[in-house]
Amino acid sequence: MNKRKSYHHGNLRQALVDATIELITERGPQGFTLAEAARQAGVSAAAPYRHFKGRDELIAEVARQGYILFGDLLEHAYNGGKPTPLAAFSTVGRAYLAFAKRYPGYYIAMFESGVSLTGSSELALASDRAMGVMTQAAETLMAHLPAAKRPPAVMVSHHIWAMSHGVVELFARGTPGGRAPYSPEDLLESGTGIYLRGLGIISE
């Protein structure tokens, strides 16, 4: 779908990012060329090279902006660990699912495009910030445990991240979403509960 757009002087970079988000959502990260992104933004095929070396760099910028938005959403969901550490931890998980559903273009660029987080310090910083919210939520949740029985918070946050991603991929987007008789939110909540009880982090 070609939606030729105009852009205000000085906004070319963001116009290209916005066009790329649409193309990624419609076609996937490998389903378009840089020239098509330019056409979607309503500019010449040469225009993107004023800001980006190629399509991969443009996708990386989409991912960077996505991680910033993602981090904001997770921080808002965490709410300083309120009203309880467990409730905050669960809310962060639901926020992960909500982000994937509401912003598929960003999500795909971040997690499915093959973009290298080490290729840009700004991208790495944005990613680390988002991951840090989940790790902080895990640390707060486990603070009541004796140090000797407390699993690494980074390990716990990465496990929950992986579980959340799996739920998104299998049950929350597109046709695969019909594979389970339960909602993605219920699947993540029950899976998280089993995992946390298995580690002895919660007993209820």
Image (spheres, helix red, strand yellow):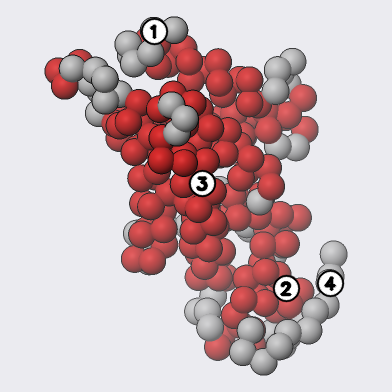
Q: Are marks 1 and 4 in contact (CB under 8 Å)?
A: no
Q: What residue type is labelled 3?
A: His
Rate crowding at label 2 as few (under 14), some (14 to 19) or many (20 or more) other CA atoms within 10 Å: some
Mark 1 lies on a secondary structure that is: loop
Amino acid found under the numbered disc labelled 1? Ser
Cα distance, mark 1 to mark 3? 27 Å
State the residue at coordinates (72%, 29%). Answer: 176
Image location of residue 98, percent across then percent down = 63, 40
Front residue of 76 and 150: 76
Dot 4 corresponds to which residue?
Answer: 3
Label 3 sits on residue: 76
Q: Nearer the viewer, residue 43 or 114?
A: 43
* Residue at 50% in and 53% down: 72
Q: Are marks 2 and 3 in contact (CB under 8 Å)?
A: no
Quarter-of-image position of residue 85: top left
Q: Residue 153's x, y, as percent?
A: 29, 31
Nearer-N-terminus badge (4/3):
4
Give residue 20's mark.
none
Residue extending furthest toward the left: 148
Residue located farthest toward the bottom when viewing the structure as drawn: 9
- For marks 2 and 4 on the same chain, the one whose residue lies earlier in the sequence: 4
Residue beneath disc 2? 36
Discs 2/4, front: 4
Depth check: give the residue in front, 72 or 9.
Answer: 72
